[in-house]
Amino acid sequence: MHDVVQDYYGKQLQSSADLKTSACCDFTAMPEWLKPVLGNIHAEVLSRYYGCGLVCPPLLEGCRVLDLGSGSGRDVYALAQLVGPHGEVVGVDMTDEQLAIAIEYQDYHSEKFGFDNVRFLKGYIEKLDELDLEPGSFDVVVSNCVINLSPDKDAVIKSIKRLLKPGGEFYFSDVYADRRVPEAVRSDPVLYGECLGGALYWNDFIQLAKRHGFTDSRLVEDRPLEITDPVLAARCGNIKFFSATYRLFNLDALESDCEDYGQAVIYRGSIADSPDRFVLDKHHDIQAGKVFPVCGNTWRMLHDTRLAPHFEFIGDFNRHYGIFEGCGVGLPFDSGLIDGAPCC
């Protein structure tokens, strides 16, 4: 499949206009703060962008970031501006044609930004241990519609865990399916190149992440994908595909379920461009200045990461109250009592 992907993205596609589905197209509503950032990126780099989401989490200044499947460098050059002159962004890609574009405009962007803080490496994201990348050296790893193209997703996730600092995060967008994709779809070169054939069944992804130490995957946003090409749609049958953004924190103390320790946080409203609310994920929209009850895992995601200075923390882990209500897992037993009396 490496040959299929290299041919598709290196030779078949000359710009995003050549795509046959919307899977590798980003329809995320562009925030105002991102517009000037993208405005500084060369037009040819932008034209060869094949991402499916926004992979720019907050608070990146001074961070060291790794972009897996960096392509023509669009996200690398966006992230370079966000990490600033004291940060670094490393892009890894296996396709010569894409890397050539990214490197061709490196001087252009360093002059535009006033600093040069990017590096591009040729390599396979399944074989990151073969590259000059120090374990535990990255604050953030990102990827934009690329993991689905990998034939060995286990190796990718394992390497990401190894490369992240404690408290670092993997923040990425990709394509998922509502069921396991059959061999006929997986082996179709066009569907594979369009990011559909290699899409993971969403629950298989959750289990894969857990196997490699990412215990509590957090869904940030998602959207259904429409396959408008009737021929390709017929090949996919009844499979439903989704573009989704997840964040996975490198925190070994996270538990398998959301446990209640009576904890809460208060968002200070101090993150740039988010004065009124902070969205951790799809189910945690935290208003500034308001006490917000959280489970132990969420508490750690905020307390043990670069997000900590922007929150006040209430409570600890000294007392446990059972499962956190409303998190999808409940008490499996009948209580046997109604208002203090035995049930009939």
Image (cartoon, rainbow, N blue to C red):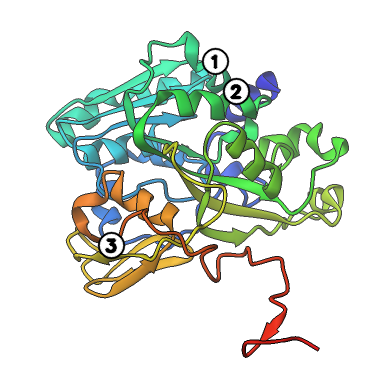
For label 2, the residue is 155
Q: Are marks 1 and 2 in contact (CB under 8 Å)?
A: yes
- Comparing marks 1 and 2, which lies closer to the viewer? 2
**Amino acid under disc 1:** Lys
Picture quarter containing residue 132? top left
Q: Secondary structure at mark 2?
A: helix
Tag 3, which secondary structure?
loop
Question: Relative to the observer, which residue lies in front, 196 or 125?
Answer: 125
Taking the image as shown, residue 312 lies to the left or right of residue 28, namely left
Which kind of residue does numbered mark 2 sit on? Answer: Ala
From the viewer's perspective, is residue 344 above or below residue 220? below
Residues under labels 1 and 3: Cα distance?
Answer: 37 Å
Q: Residues within 10 Å of mark 2 (few under 14, many from 20)?
A: some
What amino acid is at disc 3?
A: Glu
- Does the image show residue 10? no
Asked whether 216 or 222 is in front, the reply is 216
Q: Quadrant of the C terminus?
A: bottom right
Q: CA distance from mark 1 to mark 2?
A: 7 Å
Q: Residue tagged by mark 3?
A: 32
Left or right of residue 16, residue 272 in this image: left
Residue 321, horizontal then vertical, whole percent: 48, 64
Residue 147, position as x, y percentages in the image: 58, 34
Mark 1 vs 3: CB contact within 8 A? no
Which residue is denoted by mark 1 in the rendering?
A: 127
- Lower sequence index among marks 1 and 3: 3
* Residue depicted at x 57% and y 31%: 212
Identify the secondary structure beneath mark 1: helix
Q: Nearer the viewer, residue 343 or 85?
A: 343
